[in-house]
Each structure stands twice: as C-alpha cells, then as structure tokens.
Image: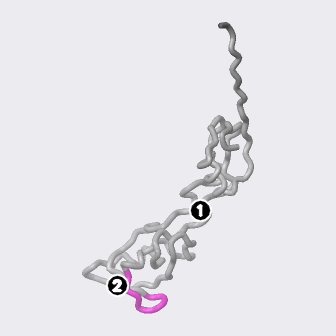
Amino acid sequence: AVGQILAESVISPRTMPPVHLAGPDGIAVRSEDTKAASPENPIEVQGIRVNTGLPMPAGYDAVIPVEEVEKVDDERFIIKGSVSSNQNMILAGTDVITGQTIVESGHYFTPYDAAALTSYGIRDISAKSWKVCIIPTGD
C-alpha cells in the first residue's frame, strides 16, 4: 500500500499502551505516601522497583526516578521529594484508544504510516492506486 491512497479511514482496534507504564527506571510508589517528603524531611516509603516501559504494579500511581531514592531494602526506600499521581508514567491510551481514527481516507500512504499501523497491530488496509497517463494532442 505504500505509495497508494487510502480508500478507507484506518480505525484503531486497540488502546495503546493498553496499561499504565513506568516512565523512567525507578520506584513505583503511592503518591499519597510521598506528600511529606522534602530535602529537609526525607521519609521512608514502600515501593516496587520498575523499569522504563514496563507495566505499573497494581495500586501504585507514580514513579520516582532511581537516581532520586536511597534503597533501605527491596521494598523500602528513602525519598527527598514528593510526586503527584501519574507523575513519571506513560498512561494507558496515550498513543491511541480503541475506535480512534489513526489515518483518514484519502491519505497518501508512506513507509512511516506502515510502521505506525504495524505497531498498532494493523496489517490490512484498503488502498487505491491512481493510474495516470498523458495523451499528447496537437503539435
């Protein structure tokens, strides 16, 4: 379909990302638990180690970058600043949601479009090609 015109709009069959993901490598925390933390008042919080792009553990709503924590043990960390809900996360549906139009009909289809649609799990599209010829007339 590359180099052709889309005959129909392409609709997303899924939400991407399908779940909340960790932004940076860090510690998943409950933002409510971090409110009292500051450089002058470091506090200990419970958290779970997460890596960039991996799903957030259930019950946790923010990530503190690994460089900003001091490990006490595998589940407890000292922090020197608070985070808000959804901070340092990639939220579900940030790229596209189910039923959203990704590419409109009439669009000239490029290799970039093919890569994007493949990442959304779309393998088949309707395209039309135009055949053009020149018919010279006259002198």
Please state if 6 lies on the left or on the right of 76 as rendered.
right
Task: Please tell me which residue is depicted at 51% across the width and 76% down the height of the picture.
Answer: 51
* View extreme (front): residue: 139
Q: Label 1's element? A: loop
User: Where does the image place residue 131, in percent across and percent down from the top left?
Assistant: 72, 29
Q: Earlier in the sequence, mark 1 or mark 2?
A: 1
Q: Please identify the quarter of the rendering in which residue 3 is found.
A: top right
Task: Please tell me which residue is depicted at 57% across the width and 58% down the height of the picture.
Answer: 93
Check residue 116 for magenta coloring.
no
Q: Label 2's element? A: strand
Relative to 79, say whether 126 is above or below: above
In front: mark 1 or mark 2? 1
* View extreme (bottom): residue: 73
User: Where does the image place residue 50, in percent across and percent down from the top left?
Assistant: 51, 78
User: Where does the image place residue 103, in percent across and percent down from the top left?
Assistant: 62, 43
Residues rendered magenta in the picture: 69-76
Please state if 58 lies on the left or on the right of 47 as rendered.
right
Question: What is the crowding at mark 2: few (fewer than 14 residues within 10 Å), some, or many (at least 20)?
Answer: some
Residue identifier under label 2: 43
User: Where does the image place residue 68, in percent across and percent down from the top left?
Assistant: 36, 78
Residue identifier under label 1: 17
Q: Nearer the viewer, residue 76 or 120?
A: 120
Task: Please tell me which residue is depicted at 66% across the width and 37% down the height of the picture.
Answer: 105
Relative to 127, say whether 36 is above or below: below
Question: What is the crowding at mark 1: few (fewer than 14 residues within 10 Å), some, or many (at least 20)?
Answer: some
Please, what is the three-letter code of the amino acid marked with disc 1?
Pro
Q: Nearer the viewer, residue 37 or 97?
A: 97
Q: Please identify the quarter of the rendering in which residue 54 is found.
A: bottom right
Please, what is the three-letter code of the amino acid marked with disc 2?
Ile
3D distance between C-alphas at marks 1 and 2: 32 Å
Label 1 with label 2: CB-CB less than 8 Å: no
